[in-house]
Amino acid sequence: MITSIVLIKTSVDQIPETAEKIAALEGVSEVYSVTGAHDLIAMVRVARHDDLADIITGQISKLPGVASTETHIAFRTYSQHDLEAAFAIGLDS
């Protein structure tokens, strides 16, 4: 299983709508709203790397309101605490 954390840049006023659309995509297991340079964090879990590319470049990045995506791929499961700690120290810097 491949786990990827996807940082999604969108405008603040579009966070709820964009988060809802991303959460509805098959393979997306969790979506968090955060403050800072990146407005949304999505956790994507897939069995194959090809599926991951399809979800991120083929679906998430093409949603209306998504300005950019940045991907951090790992081969383990992240908890909400792990995500909050990682972004508190600034993965995007």
Image (cartoon, rainbow, N blue to C red):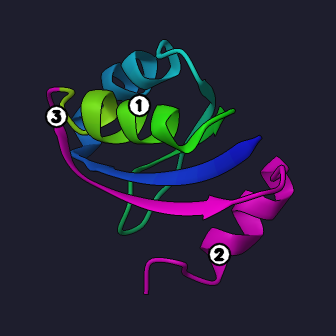
At label 3, the amino acid type is Gly
User: Mark 3 against mark 2, which lies toward the viewer?
Assistant: 3
Quarter in which the C terminus is drawn:
bottom left
Q: CA distance from mark 3 to mark 1?
A: 16 Å
At label 2, the amino acid type is Ala
Q: Position of residue 92 (x, y in %)?
A: 44, 77
Query: What is the quadrant of residue 57 in the picture?
Result: top left
Q: The magenta stretch spans which residues?
A: 64-93
Q: Name the residue tied to disc 2.
A: 88
Reply above or below: 39 against 17.
below
Q: Position of residue 49 (x, y in %)?
A: 54, 44
At horizontal 21% and vertical 45% (from top left) the residue drawn is 11
Mark identifier at residue 55: 1
Q: CA distance from mark 2 to mark 1?
A: 26 Å
Q: Would residue 81 be counted in the magenta stretch?
A: yes
Label 1 element class: helix
Q: Nearer the viewer, residue 81 or 57?
A: 57
Q: Which badge, 2 or 1, comes first in the chain's sequence?
A: 1
